[in-house]
Amino acid sequence: MTETRKLRVFLCHSSQDKPLVQQIYQRLNAEGWIDPWLDAEKLLPGQDWDLEIEKAVERSDIILVCLSNGSISKEGYLQKELRMVLEMTLNMPEGAIFLIPLKLEECEIPRRLRTWQWLEFFPPANRAAAYKKLLESLKIRADKLNLPADSKTAEPVEIPPMREQPKLKEEPVAIHSDYSDLDLYIPPEYPRLAFVPPPAKVQTWTFGEMEFVKVLHGEFLMGSTNKDKDAFEGEKPQHKLNIPYDFLMARFPVTNALFRTFVKKASFKTKAEADGFGYTWNNEEWQKTNGANWLHPRGPETEITGLDNHPVVQVHWKDAHSFCAWLNQEYASNHPRGLVFRLPTEPEWEKSARGTDGRIFPWGNEFDPKNCNFRDDGPGRTTPIGLYSPHGDSPFGCADMAGNVWEWTASLWGKGSQKPDYGYPYVSRDGREDQRSGEDVYRILRGGSFDLVSRAVRAAVRYGSIGVGDRGGFRIVLSPDLS
């Protein structure tokens, strides 16, 4: 049944862009089926500015984030209003049109907004076409909410050109014929062209429709030293460990698309689907969520439509083992001799993530927020595999090993959640690689996830779990059998 209310659209903007944003407000308001919210038009004398804006954001159906060179350099705007908007976006169903970055002039999109396809509202000659596209998105959202979307305006409201900002000094433009300095960003969720990871900086091999890199045998530095002030006790002491064989590590975690192929061909049902619930993080604790599974990561109201190249989540370690067993059956004839698909051990994962020199992050010892999906500079959800490649890759060419999603390993943590029963130095024959252990034994995950700070996405961080969560996925190796 169609509701009678109008589509609520919040105009998130910087005060210096208000003249142009006000014109956009007037045009939206004239449509008849849209209820736009702009502070200058909606706030009344005596009202609490922050409170009313927060209320308006919470009740909105869609957010237009208006961007210009002035607004993206304005710290208060990005840190306050946008943070509120992004938090709201996390609660929206996956794939829903809710946040639309609206570029008022040529400017760099803040990293936290690059997951969403933007709309360019410039130059003035192109505004009519841009406004038409905007209406198409708003109508899709209205239809999803069963709201009317019939325009009642006869004549479009003219939007004047944006006032040019004065230039302090005209700089000469250098022209390079070889285009070596051309740096183009293609949005990962561009609606007509799926994001494709860039080529690896090392040689790769494809098995089971997945890309693998070669990790050489020999010693590497495992764990952390006391010099790393961010290190946890469970990852000490740092020690040399020898892996006596070469192995192939998946370049990326397993995606929703790959996992869907497995589920369909094997007629498989995950643990969360069988149990009827998974676990979601509410910024304070894990909570049992009915209907949460790999298809609906945060519950029945969420979905993975349009997220084929994102890492699969809400998978138990047993689901990951089943995926590997299916791969071994499906692609057995193409295996390198003596190797099997399986979850990596802790040493295999860590060496693949940091190389041999004990570096703290896959790319080096200094944290760089541009190299991974983490809490302070990410979109607050999973991102497509390879979005931070190759600059965030490990020395062996593995991508996404810092942040994005936690990844299951084959190694055991122990019976308690707080302190690992299997500490360091690592000893492979002390029971920690016993694949016959039951579901009551915690398994180790590595790499951190999109909602964690930089300390928690270091290559040496270890985490034990027995549950299924909306921040946990996995990647696999082609390596000698552990059994």
Image: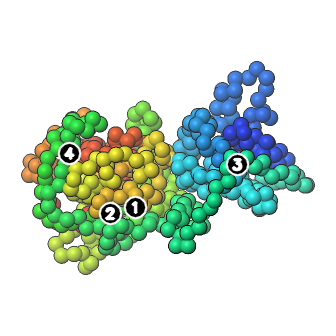
Q: Which label lies toward us, 3 or 2? A: 3
Is 60 above or below relative to 217? above
Real-space CA distance between mark 1 and mark 4, rounded to the nearest whole angstrom: 24 Å
Q: Left or right? Give the position of 341 relative to 218.
A: right
Residue depicted at x 14% and y 61%: 218
Give how far across and how far down residue 333 sits, in percent: 25, 79
- Per the image, label 3 sits on a secondary structure element best described as loop
Q: Which residue is mark 4?
A: 223
Real-space CA distance between mark 1 and mark 3, rounded to the nearest whole angstrom: 36 Å
Residue depicted at x 14% and y 47%: 239
In the rendered view of the protein, which quadrant contains the C terminus?
Answer: bottom left
Which of the marked residues, 1 or 4, is nearer the chain's N terminus?
Answer: 4
Is 444 above or below relative to 40? below
Q: Left or right? Give the position of 13 relative to 367.
A: right
Are dots 1 and 4 in contact, CB under 8 Å?
A: no
Are dots 2 and 1 in contact, CB under 8 Å?
A: yes
Which of the marked residues, 2 or 1, is nearer the chain's N terminus?
Answer: 1
Res 424 label: none
Q: Which residue is mark 1?
A: 390
Give how far across and how far down residue 13 sits, in percent: 69, 41
Q: Amino acid at mark 1?
A: Pro
Res 397 label: 2
Which of the marked residues, 3 or 4, is nearer the chain's N terminus?
Answer: 3
Image quadrant assignment for residue 342: bottom left
Which of the marked residues, 3 or 2, is nearer the chain's N terminus?
Answer: 3
Q: Which label lies toward us, 1 or 3? A: 3
Q: Which residue is mark 3?
A: 167
Real-space CA distance between mark 2 and mark 1, rounded to the nearest whole angstrom: 8 Å
- Per the image, label 1 sits on a secondary structure element best described as loop
